[in-house]
């Protein structure tokens, strides 16, 4: 039953992420929920199904792919710091190159922020999170779970680039070139950036505290 639940959770996870955003489905949903309502409903559904999938991986039969060692817990502890900072610096900011951007019409290529480092910061955070967590979770179910997420994040960036280039036309390359020439941090951004860095540090601390409550495992050695 453990493997059946894991497979079912995986199927529902991919269906919940692919079906609502299909061109034939999303306009119908947005017409009834509104753009903001669709985003909220889609995000809530994604979180619920993700929580189920992670729980199902923990309930699947334990088949070791590699042995656990004490040093492995330090990998996610170290990597999750940058992950939290990436999330804090990217969520709610304009990003016409990827998904999840807010107020994309206000994007300034001369002040790109973290997009100067990655056009897809949320996918970068997902890839780092997944790759870091696969190290101390060497059983088959978790290797499949985190390995798939890492591969999805790396492939997703290329797929989004291809779609955005098609949608934006020559403007995509022009904006990309301007972003590449922009400074990583400017004085006009520093105040807001410091607040976001503080939020990232707070998020890291909150995850350390909540991890045993949410997943039943302490991330600390």
Image (spheres, grey):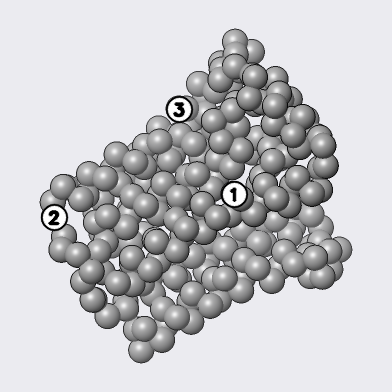
Q: Badges 1 and 3: C-beta atoms under 8 Å apart?
A: no
Q: Residue at the spot x=70%, y=55% of the render? A: 39
| Residue 110 shows in this picture | yes
Q: For mark 2, give the secondary structure.
A: loop
Name above or below for residue 55 compared with residue 193: below
Instruction: Give the position of the N terminus as an image quadrant.
Output: bottom left
Q: Nearer the viewer, residue 85 or 35?
A: 85
Total marks in image: 3
For marks 1 and 2, the one nearer the N-term is: 2
Q: Which residue is mark 2?
A: 69
Q: Residue at the spot x=74%, y=57% of the render? A: 37
Q: CA distance from mark 1 to mark 2?
A: 32 Å
| Residue 29 shows in this picture | no
Residue 198 image-quadrant placement? top left
Residue 4, horizontal then vertical, whole percent: 41, 86
Residue 116, horizontal then vertical, whole percent: 59, 28
Q: Which residue is mark 3?
A: 198
Q: Which residue is mark 1?
A: 157
Q: Residue at the spot x=41%, y=46% of the render? A: 128
């Amino acid at each position: 039953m453990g493997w059946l639940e894991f497979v079912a959770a995986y199927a529902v996870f991919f269906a919940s992420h692919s079906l609502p955003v299909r061109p034939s489905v999303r306009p119908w949903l947005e017409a009834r929920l509104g753009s903001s309502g669709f985003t909220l409903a889609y995000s809530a559904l994604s979180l619920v199904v993700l929580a189920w999938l992670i729980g199902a991986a923990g309930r699947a039969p334990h088949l070791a792919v590699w042995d656990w060692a004490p040093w492995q817990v330090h990998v996610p502890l170290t990597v999750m710091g940058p992950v939290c900072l990436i999330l804090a610096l990217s969520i709610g900011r304009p990003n016409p190159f990827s998904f999840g951007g807010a107020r994309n019409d206000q994007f300034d290529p001369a002040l790109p922020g973290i997009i100067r480092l990655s056009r897809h910061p949320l996918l970068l955070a997902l890839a780092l999170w997944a790759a870091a967590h696969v190290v101390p979770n060497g059983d088959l179910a978790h290797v499949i779970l985190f390995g798939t997420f890492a591969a999805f994040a790396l492939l997703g960036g290329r797929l989004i680039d291809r779609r955005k280039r098609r949608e934006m036309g020559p403007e995509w390359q022009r904006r990309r070139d301007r972003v590449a020439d922009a400074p990583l941090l400017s004085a006009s951004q520093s105040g807001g950036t410091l607040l976001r860095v503080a939020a990232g540090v707070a998020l890291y601390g909150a995850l350390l505290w909540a991890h045993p409550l949410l997943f039943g495992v302490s991330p600390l050695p």
